[in-house]
């Protein structure tokens, strides 16, 4: 909640499109109109298509997105989910259901094992809470990567070391500001040097 998930998806879309990938976005936060609207703004900014459904089942939106991505010849489908806390068991189960549905859609579309990535966006300022979130979401979903946001201040990022010690989940990107270009590929060596200075 408040980690910058939708903003990170928008920035990730720009990164992927800038590297030549065609992207389809899916608004699986079907209950908050503001979330769908925010993702639609990012779709417009990046000139990519979006699959959305008001009040629908997030798993159905996810299935439709994978199917549409295959039909439209997209390289990447990014599914934006509603924020949730690991203690909200019914919402964690909703994520597991979405993953199962995406797996079925991928199989039906001949895409191999889907989803290819399961990313968690975490707020780099939350300290030990971030580590607890990584544990819970990894246990529930099998995370393949992380995006750590809000690392634009000083003396931040110790959580990255704590996560690396506990879970071998790669950090793909870090958010260092609000601007589109302020999602950076994570470079562990450079980050460690900066942390020690």
Image: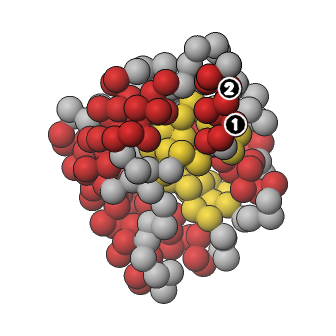
The structure's colour scheme is secondary structure
Q: Quadrant of the C terminus?
A: top right
Residue 145 horizontal/vertical position (percent): 48, 51
Instruction: Confirm or deny contact between disc 2 and disc 1 (CB under 8 A).
Output: yes
Mark carried by residue 72:
none
Q: Is residue 82 visible?
A: no
Residue holding disc 1 = 190
Residue 134 horizontal/vertical position (percent): 35, 39
Along the horizontal axis of the image, is 52 left or right of 55?
A: right
Q: Is residue 106 above or below residue 127?
A: below
Secondary structure beneath dot 1 equals helix
Q: Quadrant of the N terminus?
A: top left
Q: Quadrant of residue 21?
A: bottom right
Secondary structure beneath dot 2 equals helix
Give the spatial CA distance, label 2 vs label 1.
6 Å
Pick the residue in front: 34 or 131: 131
Pick the residue in front: 26 or 163: 163
Residue 128 horizontal/vertical position (percent): 34, 23
Residue pictured at 36% horizontal, 46% vertical: 167
Residue pictured at 19% horizontal, 42% vertical: 90
* Crowding at mark 2 (Cα within 10 Å: few <14, some 14-19, many 20+): few
Residue holding disc 2 = 194
Q: Is residue 195 above or below residue 183?
A: above
């Amino acid at each position: 909640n408040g980690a910058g998930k939708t903003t990170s998806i928008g920035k990730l879309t720009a990164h992927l499109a800038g590297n030549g990938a065609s992207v389809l976005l899916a608004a699986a936060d079907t209950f908050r109109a503001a979330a769908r609207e925010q993702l639609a703004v990012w779709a417009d900014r990046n000139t990519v298509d979006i699959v959305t459904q008001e009040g629908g089942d997030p798993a159905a939106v996810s299935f439709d997105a994978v199917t549409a991505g295959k039909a439209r010849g997209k390289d990447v489908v990014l599914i934006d989910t509603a924020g949730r806390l690991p203690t909200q068991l019914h919402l964690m189960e909703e994520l597991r259901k979405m993953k199962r549905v995406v797996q079925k859609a991928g199989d039906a579309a001949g895409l191999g094992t889907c989803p290819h990535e399961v990313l968690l966006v975490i707020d780099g300022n939350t300290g030990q809470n971030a580590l607890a979130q990584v544990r819970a979401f990894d246990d529930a979903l099998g995370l393949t990567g992380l995006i750590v946001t809000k690392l634009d201040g000083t003396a931040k990022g110790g959580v990255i070391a704590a996560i690396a010690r506990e879970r071998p989940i790669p950090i793909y990107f870090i958010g260092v500001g609000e601007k589109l270009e302020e999602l950076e590929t994570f470079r562990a060596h450079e980050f460690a040097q900066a942390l020690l200075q």
